[in-house]
Amino acid sequence: MNIHIPRVNYNPPDADVRFLEDRITEYNAETTGITDGRILSFFIRDERQEIVAGLFGWTWGGACEIRDLWVRKDMRKNGYGKALMTAAEDEAVSRRCTLIALDTHSFQAPAFYQRLGFEIIGSHPDYPRGHLKHYLRKTLKK
């Protein structure tokens, strides 16, 4: 069998990436029988409607995963990240989640998440080279 792999695509269309994500979501639901997956997102905009901070993730099967949290550089240290995480936690609890999981690099925000009650449950060394990738978890109170 000869499988042709095309050249690397450095800028795949959003629709193609979404297609893969949808197929994985379908497989996960079919395999586990858990079909309550929902997107979780918040975006804070300035007066020009430009995003100054945002959070993206999802909930599924009693768990919440935060994939992205970002605050514009000039807005950092003003409570935006904490406010977004609080909003995500409140929404996760309303969806009957019992935990939040996320990852961050050693040069990003592990101390920030730990101040919010997350614990590091594992780390990869040299991801990227010379740094750590941390995996964190927070148990939610009902």
Image (cartoon, helix red, strand yellow):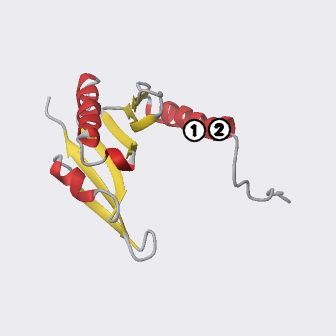
The label nearer to you, 1 versus 2, is: 2
Residue drawn at x 43%, y 69% as measured from the top left? 127
Is the residue marked by circle 2 packed among few (<14), some (14-19), or many (20+) residues within 10 Å? few
Residue 10 numbered mark, or none: none
Q: CA distance from mark 1 to mark 2?
A: 11 Å
Residue 14 numbered mark, or none: 2
Q: Quadrant of residue 37?
A: top left
Horizontally, residue 132 falls left or right of residue 78, namely right
Residue drawn at x 35%, y 56% as measured from the top left? 104
Outermost residue toward the left in this view: 141
Horizontally, residue 12 falls left or right of residue 84, namely right
The x and y percentages for residue 98 are 23, 35
Horizontally, residue 94 falls left or right of residue 115, namely right
Residue 21 numbered mark, or none: 1
Q: Quadrant of residue 141?
A: top left
- Residue 119 in sight in this render: no
Q: Nearer the viewer, residue 73 or 110?
A: 73
Amino acid type at circle 2 is: Asp
The x and y percentages for residue 43 are 40, 31
Is the residue marked by circle 1 packed among few (<14), some (14-19), or many (20+) residues within 10 Å? few
